[in-house]
């Protein structure tokens, strides 16, 4: 049996690992266009800041692949797949397969043409370039106030740069959380960076060795901003060029076995999409999902029969010390009027005074009280969201969360956790 | 309608609050033998350390009771209940009731006779006495290395005292977590206090103005330890003296409405017991449970029909910065051979190196994989336990927890949370 994997990111490498686990005999080959074995893309901002070295974020090393008897071909782009004849083409020749796993990821896109010292942050090469660029720089301009834009902003502030983040939308982080939660985060971080909201980039140009970004605000007024370099972080698009012949929408469509519309051909990670809890098609954009898909597709490609559980899109980040997490759809993507409960409170009992930190939890439920998502800001946001992810995954209700105990101690948590109180508020609005 | 409540702790005061919520007209009276309105007993160690003032830990003030039209009689012990005639006796006379709520709490007990400057830490008076005593003291001896003993030890160390904690059992914290988890905690904290395990106290005496505790170890060898004062923290016993005529075991037995064996008589808080997830009778010992019982009993005493959800005993504390939490029965109280999964790992992805902290999670499941409890040590232990509490409450399995996503980001959490990995290990042991 011969398994070919295209792309050695988290999804592809995990697929290789689980294919090998399932089948000790199979011939497994990975083709990767870049020059690094699998590393954590999420950790790239820490390479930019210099806190982590490029080598330290490698998770599956070349040695690991050798020891697992998996052939890793770096610097080897795949140019074409012939699904009928089960063969792929590379500059070095063709390669047959019995099972194929497409893990081609996604690529950044820019709303305008880029010029001069303009970067994106998607791969190791990008991170090293930005790190080097920032050594002699004082001012950076980041276009896009999403998760990548802000994480990169923080990494540059750590290096002493003055950073301006420009965002087309009226608030930061709007692909991660709703406007109300994002605003809380912005208020916390805007002393550290300059944030320009509602600014559409019109042009990026180099002028006398200085980069200039021209933008216009809602009224059409143009602003010219100068900086030493520019980072475009306006989002990614699934790499589906090789998927010609497969069902593709925003990204490659896969079933619960991570199989595409062609039998024996699997797809995993950022090049795929899934259907969320309220029925939306959502491109995968999370490392954690990529890994889970890799486990399923790798096992299945090697003869297994694993099923991908429904995805709730649990996500988190920490920006300038502010933890943010969410699970389930954003409000604007919920196609009905959800029941909402929002609670702002302290992470410790009232009597602990300033030792407790302000934190926020918002929960969404359907009209039957079933939890469909939640968002949180502040200390332990991600752990609270993990509980909501469990609830959303198994269709637990507000009432059920309310009735479950939470641990209480003065130095740790209040009698009722913020997550419970958000559910309490939402429950009152049921009917 | 006349509702009488005996005891103004967390359970009694919450019962009064919910009785008033349910019935705007009822006459509600609380009889409290102490001189303070409701305060957080859990916060008493912070009064000992001086970090919080006695007034600051009051949660339901006398003014609150006045405004809620609830009569609070402080310094008024109840000496007898006549269940047949529905009347209670106090030094000031008798009082009739339609519904009665017993919230008499528990009292510390000492394994030996106490003498001289020996204290326990159960009420505000105790905390103030210990705080004053510690002002001119250098060495304190604490008997009992449970949660109260260790929290008090920390509060005294904060005041600069040298503290020795003496424990009869072979490990600390054995009523909260299993020996393996407790040992991890002890290794972290034993630089800060002296811990003597396996020492049975034989005598507490005062000699020439110095306190002396005589103990014997397993071999029978006696040790005499000197200190300026002694705190006995060897546990509490339910106050059931007034419950003569009710079904009582270790504590007052109540049904799911928090009603005792006599109709119209409710009991809540530390004077009651409940049946845990594996069928053991367990005395209530948690403020969070007391509050939930108060909500149910208060509502029902005023004519409502609330049901107490099953209790999972989610509990936590933080000692010298080490967070510990657990839910469900201890191993020794599980009457069958549970499936166990234990995981030790970092709270951040591997590549984040020392930025991640060591943490531990252990999960218990029955032979069908259903989660019955968990224990955790380290950062975010309580939040992880809250997720397990939800799982145990609704009978979710290891497999179900495994399949639920957790949020991942380099600065927040690894791809698979420690809780997921503990479940993974346990699942492999399922036949």
Image (cartoon, coloured by chain):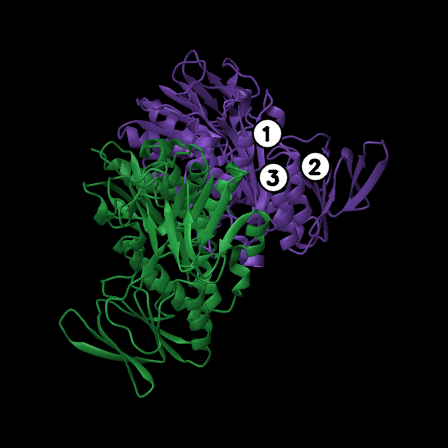
Chain colours: A purple, B green
In this rendering, the answer to whether B347 lies above or below B307 is below
Observer-nearest of A224 and B185: B185
Instruction: From this view, report whether residue B37 is shown above or below residue A24.
Output: below
Residue drawn 52% across the image and 37% down it: B23
Is residue B159 or residue B204 the one in the foreground? B204
Q: Nearer the viewer, residue A319 or A345?
A: A345
Give the spatial CA distance, label 1 vs label 3: 15 Å
Q: Quadrant of the C terminus of chain A?
A: top right
The residue depicted at 21 percent of the width and 78 percent of the height is B223
User: Residue B264 or A105: which is nearer the viewer?
Assistant: B264
Picture coordinates of residue A77, whole percent (x, y): 50, 29
- Disc 2 to disc 3, C-alpha distance: 12 Å
Residue B11 visible to the viewer: no
Earlier along the polypeptide chain: callout 2 or callout 3?
3
Q: Chain of mark 2?
A: A
**Chain for numbered disc 1:** A
Disc 3, SS: helix
Depth check, mark 2 against mark 3: the one in front is: 2
| Circle 2/circle 3 CB separation < 8 Å | no
Name the N-terminal-most of marks 2 and 1.
2
Distance of label 2 from label 1 (alpha carbons) = 14 Å
Location of residue B204 (image quadrant): bottom left
Residue B40, image x and y in percent?
A: 47, 56
**Marking on residue A171:** 2
Residue beneath label 3, please? A147
From the image, tell me which residue sits under label 1.
A330
Secondary element type, mark 2: loop
**Percent from the top left, x then y, of residue A370?**
48, 26
Q: Tell me if residue A341 can be seen.
A: yes
């Amino acid at each position: 049996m011969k398994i070919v994997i295209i792309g050695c990111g988290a999804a592809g490498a995990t697929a290789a690992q689980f294919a090998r686990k399932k089948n000790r005999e199979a011939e497994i080959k990975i083709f990767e266009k870049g020059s690094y074995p699998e590393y954590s893309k999420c950790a790239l901002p820490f390479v930019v800041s210099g806190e982590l070295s490029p080598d330290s974020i490698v998770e599956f090393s070349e040695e690991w692949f050798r020891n697992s008897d998996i052939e890793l071909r770096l610097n080897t782009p795949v140019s074409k797949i012939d699904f009928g004849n089960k063969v792929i083409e590379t500059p070095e020749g063709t390669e047959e397969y019995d099972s194929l796993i497409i893990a081609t990821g996604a690529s950044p896109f820019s709303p305008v043409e880029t010029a001069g010292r303009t970067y994106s942050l998607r791969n190791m090469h990008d991170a090293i370039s930005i790190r080097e660029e920032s050594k002699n720089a004082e001012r950076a301009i980041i276009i896009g106030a999403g998760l990548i834009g802000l994480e990169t902003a923080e990494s540059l502030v750590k290096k002493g740069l003055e950073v301006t983040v420009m965002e087309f939308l009226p608030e930061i982080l709007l692909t991660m959380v709703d406007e109300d939660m994002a605003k809380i985060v912005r208020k916390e971080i805007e002393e550290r960076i300059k944030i320009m909201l509602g600014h559409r980039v019109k042009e990026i140009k180099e002028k006398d060795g200085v980069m200039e970004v021209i933008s216009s605000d809602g009224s059409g007024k143009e602003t010219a901003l100068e900086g030493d370099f520019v980072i475009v972080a306006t989002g990614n698009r699934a790499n589906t060029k090789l998927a010609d012949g497969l069902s593709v929408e925003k990204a490659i469509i896969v079933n619960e076995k991570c199989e595409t519309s062609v039998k024996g051909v699997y797809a995993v990670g950022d090049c795929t999409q899934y259907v969320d809890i309220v029925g939306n098609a959502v491109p995968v954009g999370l490392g954690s999902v990529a890994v889970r898909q890799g486990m399923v597709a790798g096992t299945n490609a090697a003869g297994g029969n694993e099923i991908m559980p429904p995805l709730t899109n649990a996500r988190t980040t920490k920006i300038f010390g502010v933890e943010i997490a969410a699970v389930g759809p954003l409000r604007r993507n919920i196609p009905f009027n959800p029941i909402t409960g929002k609670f702002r409170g302290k992470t410790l009992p009232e009597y602990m005074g300033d030792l407790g930190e302000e934190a926020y939890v918002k929960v969404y439920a359907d009209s039957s009280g079933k939890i469909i998502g939640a968002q949180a800001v502040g200390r332990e946001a991600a752990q609270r969201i993990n509980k909501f992810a469990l609830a959303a995954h198994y269709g637990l209700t507000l009432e059920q969360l309310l009735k479950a105990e939470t641990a209480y101690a003065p130095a740790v948590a209040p009698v009722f956790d913020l997550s419970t109180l958000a559910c309490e508020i939402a429950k009152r609005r049921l009917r």
